[in-house]
Amino acid sequence: MSDQYVYPFSAGSREQVDLLGGKGANLAEMTQLGLPVPPGFTITTDACRYYMRYGHEPSVLADQVKRELGAVEAILGRIFGDPKNPLLVSVRSGAKVSMPGMMETVLNVGLNDETLEGLAALSHSRRFALDSYRRLLQMFGRTVLDIDAELFEAVLDDAKSAAGAASDVELSEGDLERVVASFKEIIEQESGSPFPQDPFTQLTMSIHAVFDSWNSPRAIVYRNTERIPHDLGTAVNVCSMVFGNLDDQSATGVAFTRDPATGARGVYGDFLLNAQGEDVVAGIRNTLSLPDMENLLPENYRELVGIMEKLERHYRDLCDIEFTVESGRLWMLQTRVGKRTAAAAFRIATALLDEGAITENEALMRVTGDQLSRLMFPAFDSHAERVLLARGMNASPGAATGHVAFTTADVLARAKEGTRSILVRRETNPDDLAGMITAEGVLTARGGKTSHAAVVARGLGRTCVCGVEAFTVDEAAREVRVDGEVVLRDGDLVSIDGTSGEVFLGEVPVQPSAVAAYFESGASLDDGDATSLKGLDDAEADLVTSVDRLMRIADRERALLVRANADTPEDAARARRMGAQGIGLTRTEHMFLGDRRTLVENLILAASPEEREGALAALLPLQRRDFLEMIREMDGLPMTVRLLDPPLHEFLPDLTELSVRIAKAEERGEHNEHEIKVLEAVKRLHEQNPMLGLRGVRLGLSIPGLFGMQTRAILEAEAQARAEGLNPQVEIMIPLVSSVRELREIKKEIFAVRDAVTQETGLKLTTVIGSMIELPRAALRADEIAEEAEFFSFGTNDLTQTTWGFSRDDVEAGFFFTYKEHGILLTSPFESIDQFGVGELVRIGTERGRAVNPDLHVGVCGEHGGDPSSIHFFNWLGLDYVSCSPFRVPVARLEAGRATLGVDDFVMSH
Ligand code: PEP
Ligand code: MG
C-alpha cells in the first residue's frame, strides 16, 4: 500500500478503478476530458481496507483530506466551515464494481447553525439553506448515527400535513425551521449527543460511515449473490456541493446515452426541477422525462446532449450519467458504462460495430453468456400484474405457469387430461424424474443450486426455483404454508420465474423467446438478416440478427470445440441444431430406466452365468437401437458413449418402501417370491456411501459381460450405420477410473468383443477408447492412463466431489449457505470450477497425459462445461473441447469465443 490515500479528481483516470473505485475513476476521467465536474477528491480503497483491517483510519489520512479540501477551497473561493462563505461537500461511496443502493451517501456536509446563515445569505434563500440543513440532519442521522429513518420521515409527514403541502417543495421557511429543530432533537435523543457542529467532525464521521457500510448486511448479501470479493473495500468521494434545489433554474437528473432496455439511440432519462439527487431515485415526486428539459432549461439541455455524445464517443459504449443544474449552470456528478438488459447488450454491441465505434472482437466482448442464456428463456411479461408469494433460488431459468401438484403421480395423471402442472416438493429425488420431465416447472422448499431438483431441471431445460425457505411444503396435507398460513393448495395456479427465483400466485402471461426459436431452427441466418423470419416484430428481428452476428464472430475466434451431453436422439438432434460439434457424453444409465428397469432387475437377480447372459441378451437389441438412432443424428460428428456408471441399486426399489410393502403383504397372508428376492438384492447391494462404492469401471469389472454387452451394442450399431452409408464416429468412454490397471483389464473385454464383431461383420471398426478423469488419483496418474486412453474427459462433477470431499447431493442443502456467509465459498464449486484445487488437478492431468501422448484429445463433460467462467479457465488450460447440455451449447460457443479474446488472468500454484 502506498501512503497516498487521497487523489484530487484532476489527478486520476478511469484505468484506476481498483484504487479509486468506479465513481472516483470516472469523475477523474470526466475532469480530464474538460467536462464540468465540481472539484473534489477521492479517498482510496486502500484507506478503506486499512480501516477494515485495523479498526481505525491511517494516521496520515486526516492531513491528506485537509490538504485536498484546501485545494478545493482555493478553486471555489469558499471555505469549509466559514460562517460567511461556506464550502459544503458530499460524501459518497464508490466501490470498484457498482453496488447500487448498497452503501451510504451523505450530502451537504459542512452545514451547521452558523454556516446555515452563510448559505442563506449566499443563495439569497433562507428556505433553501434550511432545506439543505434538514437533508444533512436526516442523512447523517440515518446513515452515520444509525437512527431509524422512520423517525425523520414521521416529522416530515406531520409538517406536510400541518401545512397542507403535497410535497416537501411546498414547505415554507417556517415549516422547515421547525423540521430542523425536531431533527436535531431526534439526533440528540437517539444518539445521546447533539448533532456535531464541527464540520471536520461531520466529514470524518461520514467517511467512516461509508467505510462501515461496505460491511453492512445488505452489502454482504449483495456481494455474495453477485460474486464480488469481500476484501475489495470502497473508495469515498468527497465532492463540492452543487445544488439542484437552489431555485427554479436548478434541477437534478439521470440520463442514458441510449435506451438501456432496448439499446435504441436517443435521449433517455428523468429529471426534477428544484430537487436534490436522492429525490429522483426515491420516487417521492413524479419525475419529468429528459426531452422535456429542452423546453424548461434549453441551454443546459443542449450542453447536456453534447456532453452525452462526447462521453459515448470517448467510452465507446452506453453511458449513464447523473447531473445537476445549479441556477442555470450544468454540472456532471457521475458517469459510468451503464447497466443494460441482455437484449440491449446485444443490440448495442452490433449498433456500435455498425457505427464503426468498435471492432468485431470488441463487440463480442461487450456481451456475455449469461446474457445470452437469459435471452433464450421465455420470460414473464414484466408489465403484467402479479402477486409475489416468495423468493427462492433461481436454479434453472425460464418462466412457467401450472397447477400445483405435490406428487409425480399427480403430474402424470393430470398431464393425461391436458392439465399443466408445477411439481411442488420439499425436495425432489430420482423417483421424481418422470414428474419433472412432464411438469412445466419444479418448485422446492429445500436445496440449493446443485440440489437434485436444480441439476436435473437444468439438464432438462425445465424451469426451476428451489430452496424457497419461506415455504413449508406439506405434501400430506397438500398445501404450502408461509408462517403457518396456507398460500397454495393442490391444483392452485402458480407461476415460477427460474431466472429471478420469484414465485407468483396465479397465471402471469409469458412471452416466448425469439432467440431460442432462432437457435432451435438451426441457428444460422442465410443472409445474416432476421427480418425475414416469421412472426418476429422489428425489435425481435433486430435482436436475433445481432445474436447471429456475434455468434459468428465467436465461432470464428474460438479455439475450444463445443460438444453436448445428450442421451436421446431428440437431444442429439437438438444439440446439433444448437451448433454442437459432437456429443461429449451419453449417459447410458438413462437408457435403463422406465420399462427397462425390469430387464436390469433380471440382470441383478441372475443367479447363474446363464441367467446373466440371458438378461444381457435381452438388453442388447434395445441398446443397439438406442445407439443407432443417436449415431444417425450425429452422422459425421464424434459421439462419446459412456459405459454404465451408477450403482446398481439405483435401478432397484427403495429399501424401506419395499420392506414395508412386503411386510404389509405378509400381514395379509400374501407371499411375493419375486419381491423377496429383490429385497435380498437391495440389501446385498446396499452401500453406506454409494457414490464412492460399486459404480463405474468397478461395476464393469464386477459384472462380467455388462460392459461387453454395451460395447457390442455400440459396435453393431456402428456397423449398421456404415451399412446405411453413414459416417459414424463413436468413442467409448470408461467412467470412474482411478488406476491404469482397471483400464487395461476392461479393455481386454472390449477388445474381445471388438474382435468378435469385426469377424462377424467383416468391417474394420475404429473402437476409440478413452477414460473419464474424475477422481484425483486418475489426474495424478494421468501419464500412465494416457498410455491406454486415446482421449480424456474430465468429469468435473465427481472430481469436485472427491477433491473437496463434498457430497454434491448434500452440500448445498447442508452447509453451503454457512460457507457463503463466512465468505469461505462465493460460488458453489459444483457450479463454477474451483480453479485452484479441482482446476489444478485438471491442469496436472492434462499436462501429464499429453507428456506421454501429445495427440491426447482432452475435454470436460461435467456441469462446468457450460459455465462461462469455467469455460474461460478450460480455454486457458488449452483443452480441446467442453461438453454441456444442448441448451447451453450457444452459451458455451459464445464464451469460448470470448475466452480467446479476453485477458483472463489465472495463476496456478504448483
Ligand atoms: C462428472 O462426474 O462430471 C460426470 C460428467 O459424470 P456424472 O455427472 O454422470 O457423474
Ligand atoms: Mg461422474
Image: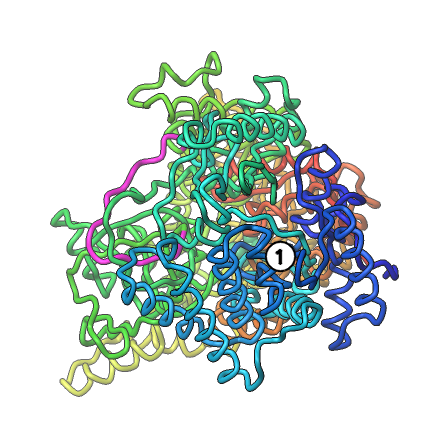
Q: Is residue 715 visible?
A: no
Question: Taking 804 as reference, is 506 above or below it?
Answer: above
Query: Along the line of sight, which residue is nearer the eye, 706 or 373?
Result: 373
Choose top left, top right, bottom left or bottom right for residue 423: bottom left
Going 45% across and 37% down the picture, which residue do you hit?
Answer: 269
Q: Where is the C terminus found, in terms of image quarters?
A: bottom right
Query: Along the line of sight, which residue is nearer the eye, 134 or 79?
Result: 79
Q: Is mark 1 within 8 Å of ligand 1?
A: no
> Viewed as shown, does residue 493 lie left or right of 898?
left
Q: Where is the N terminus found, in terms of image quarters?
A: bottom right
Going 71% across and 53% down the picture, which residue do you hit?
Answer: 78
Query: Along the line of sight, which residue is nearer the eye, 75 or 726?
Result: 75
Q: Is residue 565 visible?
A: yes
> Viewed as shown, does residue 38 lie left or right of 906?
left
Asked if residue 799 lies in the magenta stretch, the reply is no
Residue furthest right in the image? 3
- What segment carries the magenta color? 500-515
Choose top left, top right, bottom left or bottom right for residue 393: bottom left
Going 69% across and 49% down the picture, which residue do you hit?
Answer: 24
Q: Position of residue 162 (x, y in %)?
A: 28, 67
Q: According to the image, label 1 marks what residue?
A: 90
The amino acid on which the numbered mark 1 sits, given as a three-letter code, is Ser
Secondary structure of the residue carrying numbered label 1:
strand
Asked if residue 514 lies in the magenta stretch, the reply is yes
Question: Taking 244 as reference, is 131 above or below it?
Answer: below
Q: Position of residue 611 (x, y in %)?
A: 40, 61
> Viewed as shown, does residue 756 lie left or right of 413?
right
Q: Position of residue 676 (x, y in %)?
A: 30, 77
Mark 1: few, some, or many residues within 10 Å (few <14, many ≥20)? many
Q: Position of residue 107 (x, y in %)?
A: 57, 59
Colour option used: rainbow
